[in-house]
Amino acid sequence: MLRVVILEGGDLGELKIERSSGEDRLDQEALRLVQLAFPIPLDYALSRPQVVVRIPISYSLSSD
């Protein structure tokens, strides 16, 4: 579970792991994945200085 702060213009304000997967490599990849989405293109600025969202990221391993 990641905690993400999105700033008014769509920029990333803060990003941290709120609940670890237990595997540092997976946690770091989750952070990298979210960072790739920023800055978020917004049609309009947010109506507040920042918005906090929690993003669950789920990985599954298969032997295919």
Image (tube, rainbow, N blue to C red):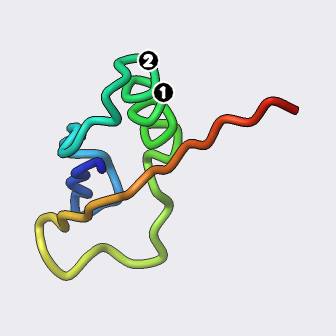
Residue at 25 percent of width and 52 percent of height: 4
The quadrant of the image that shows the C terminus is top right
Q: Is residue 59 above or below residue 32?
A: below
Q: How many marks?
A: 2
Residue 33 x, y percent position in the rendering: 51, 37
User: What is the three-letter code of the residue carrying label 2?
Assistant: Arg
Residue 21 x, y percent position in the rendering: 34, 35
Residue 41 x, y percent position in the rendering: 50, 61
Near-viewer residue (56 or 35) = 56
Q: Is residue 26 above or below residue 54?
A: above
Judge from the rendering whether residue 17 lies leftward or rightward of residue 59; answer left or right: left
The single residue placed furthest to the front in the displayed view is: 63
User: What is the three-letter code of the residue carrying label 1?
Assistant: Glu
The single residue placed furthest to the left in the displayed view is: 49
Residue that mark 2 sits on? 25
Judge from the rendering whether residue 59 lies leftward or rightward of residue 12; answer left or right: right
**Residue at mark 1 to residue at mark 2: CA–CA distance:** 6 Å
Residue 51 x, y percent position in the rendering: 19, 67
Near-viewer residue (30 or 38) = 30
Disc 1 secondary structure class: helix
Mark seen at residue 40: none
Disc 2 secondary structure class: helix
Residue that mark 1 sits on? 29
In the rendered structure, are the residues bearing label 1 and label 2 in contact, judged by CB atoms less than 8 Å apart? yes
Q: Is residue 46 above or below residue 30?
A: below
Q: Is residue 47 above or below residue 40?
A: below
Q: Residues within 10 Å of mark 1 (few under 14, many from 20)?
A: few
Residue at 15 percent of width and 64 percent of height: 50
Residue at 26 percent of width and 57 percent of height: 6
The residue mark sitting in front, 1 or 2, is 2
Q: Residues within 10 Å of mark 2 (few under 14, many from 20)?
A: few
Near-viewer residue (16 or 51) = 16
